[in-house]
Image: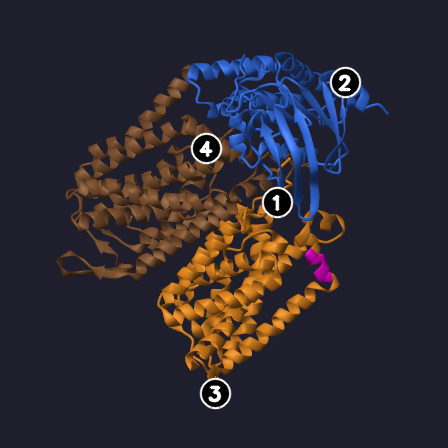
Chain colours: A orange, B brown, C blue
Amino acid sequence: METALQVLVSGVLTGAEYALAAVGMTLIFGVGRVLNLAHGAFLALGAYIAYQSTVLGLPAVAGAVPAAAAGALLGAAVERVTVRPLRSQPLTAAVVLLGLAILAEQGFSAAWGTSSHSVPLRLPTLLIGRLVLSMEQLIAAGVVVALFGMVAGYLWTRPGLALRAAAADAEIAQLAGVNVPRAQTATFGVACGMAAVAGAFLSPLLTLSPTMGRSPLFLSLAMVAIGGPGRVWGTIVAGIGVGLASTAVEFYLAPPWSSVLALVLLIAAVVSRADGALGRMRSWRRSYS
Amino acid sequence: MEALLLVTLWRIAWCLVPLGLAVAAQDRFLQSVLTFAAAQALYVASWDLIGGVGGQPSLGHALGFGAGAYTTVVVAGQNLAPPPVAIALGVLGGGLGGVLQGGFSARLHRVSVALVTLAMAECAREIAGMFRFPWSGGLIVGGNSGIPMLVYPPDEGSAARLAGAVLTAGLLGLLWIKHSRLGLAIQTVRADDRLAAANGVNVPRVRVIAFVLAGCVAGLAGGLVAAAAGRVSPSMLSLEPSLFAVAAAAVAGSGTILGPASFAYAITAALQWLDVPGTMRLTLYALLLIGAGLGPVVMTRLSTAGRTRPPLTSRGAA
Amino acid sequence: MILQAGEAAASGPGLLRVEDVITRFDGVTALNGLTLSLAAGESLGISGPNGCGKTTLVNVISGFVRAEQGRVWLADTEITRWPPHRVVRAGIARTFQRPRLAFRMTVEQNLEAATLHRNLRARKRRQVVNQVLSIAGLEPLRAREAWTLSLGAIRRVEVGRALATGGTVVLLDEPFASLSPDDAPEVFSVLRRLKREGVSMLIIAHGFGVFHTLCDRVAVIEAGRVIRAGRPAEVLRG
């Protein structure tokens, strides 16, 4: 019973951290109409930066700040250089991003070697009732909740409204004066920053290796597909749910099963959404005439 | 009419080249290189049927390839059939992969097709890496190290000739499909699936058929590779072969069957000859994909740099 | 005659019947209990303001949109929720409001693609394609890639494509939309020829000239229902 509770709480916390990355991906899809297949690479980047922090004697969560900055700047640059020119070809853009993710893997192996690393906990562990939680987890949870609040709050502000307009119909938003390309670049940057932060928070739980970004990529895709592409709250809920399921499966079965679960959920979600969730680039009706 | 005949003869002649090279090669290392080159070319040609001709961007074609390889190794290893038959049965494994991928993606938009096929191949790879089981000879096989089999054909010369012959036959077969009524249906579905439906084409069924055919050929290629290498492993289901197919087609004339196959043949031969390691190959494929994706855009920008008005874009982009 | 009966043979009045069809999209009721019928050999015009459901009607009949309620009949066979390819094989062909062709293929290839489902031998297939090219006046354009054609020619290829599928009923969704006064007569004469051949047609159009000269009857649709139907002279008065 204790273990079940432990798995539940850890699962929810882990899920929330993955959901942070997933929300970034869903925003990129909503505003930029592109699937960021390099999202896992940004998460991995954050994890490696967190690892580097622990090497310097700091706790992993301290790495979240440089991770956010690095993720955001790189993300914005990637968007500007590779995604914007391919705006009219979303599939090509997605494949190019996948290519970049693979190049990133090479970068990671060049910088940190091909062998695995693990990120130690530097802050004390707490015993709350019967639950064992690390300070890292709690700080991460707090920051994640704050970030969710900020994102949701932002979308209700005036500049946030511009983002939502751009997501609903880029052409019309542009005509209404919204600088859509700039909004798309900014969103991509922020979203990648969020993925990197998630990576930093998740790093103590993951084994770091150059290809570590692939599993989180599929997890994020599954969360976005289930929660609704472009829907922030749906993705958060789906993220926590999928994260919880994934943790439970990893605990009660074996780690590779959680990857399989994520993949199966992804396939099921995409296929069951009638005309294909993540392919809903044009409405079914508009392409009918 | 004469032009058509010439083109057809030229194409048939080109298909015979790999067999000719295999027969002519004397050096054993070269023969081995040509074996793998031929198998990879066949694999990539099969992708081109669904991806190039059919416009279904599968990012998980490794599923058919790997399933065929595993089928061949299991059949041969358990002595269920002699090795040549085991290789041929790779067709079934690959076809099954095609049924699954085609069945799930037949009604999806292109980006979703890419995702679902990618996810299915990854799923298969994870599962293949998870299970270990006892094998003949008291071995425990499976998992990430894969399953061994006796190399077939045992000498490099026969292997090269076998692979070359299978490639020649496979290319001719794929070309024949492309120019058949089924091929026209597949191309019409690619051009506009609602139009195809309005022409009486059962769109989902045509898509599944294309996937199954491509899967069968990929499975055969997988069987050849497994038999030549003497082993199958989950890496044959991974991103590397999947992206290789996409990259080759993107760079070398997607939809032409012969273009991607020729490119794959040449590149595989070069990489094998130079003994380039796996991670570098994957990096190369990534660079090719990025180049193929961004290249046309960059070229357009450069060519319009001096003009006052940009040219009209052509219809039907991506 | 290139046209042949499909699964359901043409017979008597009420060849195509739409009964009380209701469809909804995202809360909007596009068709609200629409009923009409098309007799064999008849040309029925469909008129009405934008957004009244004309294209949805064609989509429902041809199987691209599912009717939530109501039925569609082709002679004695109910075809209500049949998928598009099955409807085509039963003998109903359609064109699209915004022209759909395989633009990178030639005119001839486009027409050939339309005969795919008919299981014709090569010679018969060529015969059908040649007949259609002749009827639609497309002979000189047969080897041209579709994207190079004028809109009038594209519309004619569309009509030709619908014919080549071998249908006894052709649904034409605004075949004259966006056509210049120079292009319209080309399409007009093709449709007139079809009428003479006895093809049953349902024509969505806005210009009343079309109805008076091509159609035996006209149905006016508003808010997803037929509000008036009858001879063009009577219905379109005022």
Same chain shared by disc 4 and disc 1? no
N-term mark: 3 or 1: 3
Query: Label 4 belongs to which residue?
Result: B186
Left or right of A44? Residue A30 is right
Residue A176 seen: yes
Could you say whether the residue bearing mark 3 is in a helix, strand or loop? strand
Task: Decide: is A289 above or below C196.
Answer: below
Question: Which SS class for mark 2?
Answer: helix
B9 relative to B73 in the view: left or right: right
Q: Which mark is residue B105?
A: none
Q: Is residue A163 magenta?
A: yes
Judging from the image, mark 2 belongs to the subunit labelled: C
- The amino acid type found where label 4 is placed reads Ile
Q: Nearer the viewer, mark 2 or mark 1?
A: 2
Along the line of sight, the residue nearer the viewer: B236 or C203:
C203
**Marking on residue A127:** 3
Q: Quick check: do tags 3 and 1 share a chain? A: yes
